[in-house]
Image (cartoon, rainbow, N blue to C red):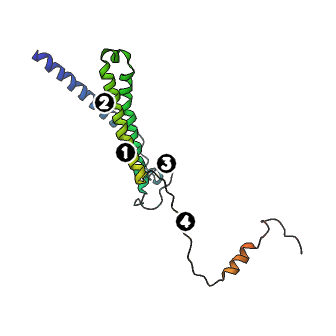
């Protein structure tokens, strides 16, 4: 019995060593055979096809983070409900112990209820509302009178390349 258990640990160790050799061998082979021609374009950061502009200290709106977390919570909810639904849909398991079927249903409803309560909390807090910033009106003090701006805005000009009619 002792020899058999030791042999199983030896098999596990053999798989671990074999996988490490396989991974390291692939990396070393790639390092030896791959061409190395660095350039400024290859060494530049790449993000979704956009050229990096400015510094990396850009302030992101917290709504992106909150929406990501809310998505993650409900994604995990679906992930946890699939095994429950698979077991609950098996008629033979429910027929073997009918009380467990009702218990599983109540358990799933409590789980979904807690998540719904979390959704209501996030919604009431206003974290799901995607509020767009309002444009601010310019408060520039100008020496030009407002009537002159109004007259200029009402004046129409002909499109480029079209001659104005003679008066």
Return the disc, 4 or 1, that comes first in the chain's sequence. 1
Q: Whole-Å distance between the Cαs marked 1 and 3?
A: 33 Å
Q: Quadrant of the C terminus?
A: bottom right
Would you name the residue on which mark 1 appears? 118
Would you name the residue on which mark 4 appears? 135
Q: Whole-Å distance between the Cαs marked 4 and 2?
A: 58 Å
Q: Residues within 10 Å of mark 3 (few under 14, many from 20)?
A: few
Labels in figure, total: 4
Return the disc, 2 or 3, that comes first in the chain's sequence. 2
Q: Quadrant of the N terminus?
A: top left
- Check if mark 1's residue and mark 3's residue have beta carbons within 8 Å: no
Q: Using the rendered view, name the quadrant where residue 32 is placed.
A: top left
Would you name the residue on which mark 2 appears? 22
Label 1 SS: helix
Q: Residues within 10 Å of mark 1 (few under 14, many from 20)?
A: some
- Check if mark 2's residue and mark 3's residue have beta carbons within 8 Å: no
Residue 112, position as x, y percentages in the image: 37, 36
Label 2 SS: helix
Would you name the residue on which mark 3 appears? 48
């Amino acid at each position: 019995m002792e020899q058999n258990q030791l042999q199983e640990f030896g098999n596990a160790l053999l798989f671990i060593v074999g996988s490490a050799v396989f991974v390291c061998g692939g990396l070393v082979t790639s390092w030896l055979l791959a061409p190395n021609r660095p350039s400024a374009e290859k060494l530049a950061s790449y993000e979704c096809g956009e050229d990096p502009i400015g510094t990396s200290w850009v302030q992101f709106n917290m709504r992106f983070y909150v929406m990501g977390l809310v998505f993650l919570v409900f994604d995990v909810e679906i992930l946890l409900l699939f095994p429950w639904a698979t077991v609950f849909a098996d008629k033979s398991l429910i027929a073997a112990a009918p009380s467990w079927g009702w218990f599983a249903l109540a358990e799933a409803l409590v789980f979904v209820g807690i998540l719904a309560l979390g959704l209501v909390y996030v919604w009431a807090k206003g974290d799901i509302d995607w509020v767009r910033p309002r444009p601010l009106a310019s408060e520039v003090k100008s020496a030009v009178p407002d009537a002159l701006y109004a007259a200029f805005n009402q004046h129409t000009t002909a499109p480029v390349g079209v001659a104005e009619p003679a008066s």
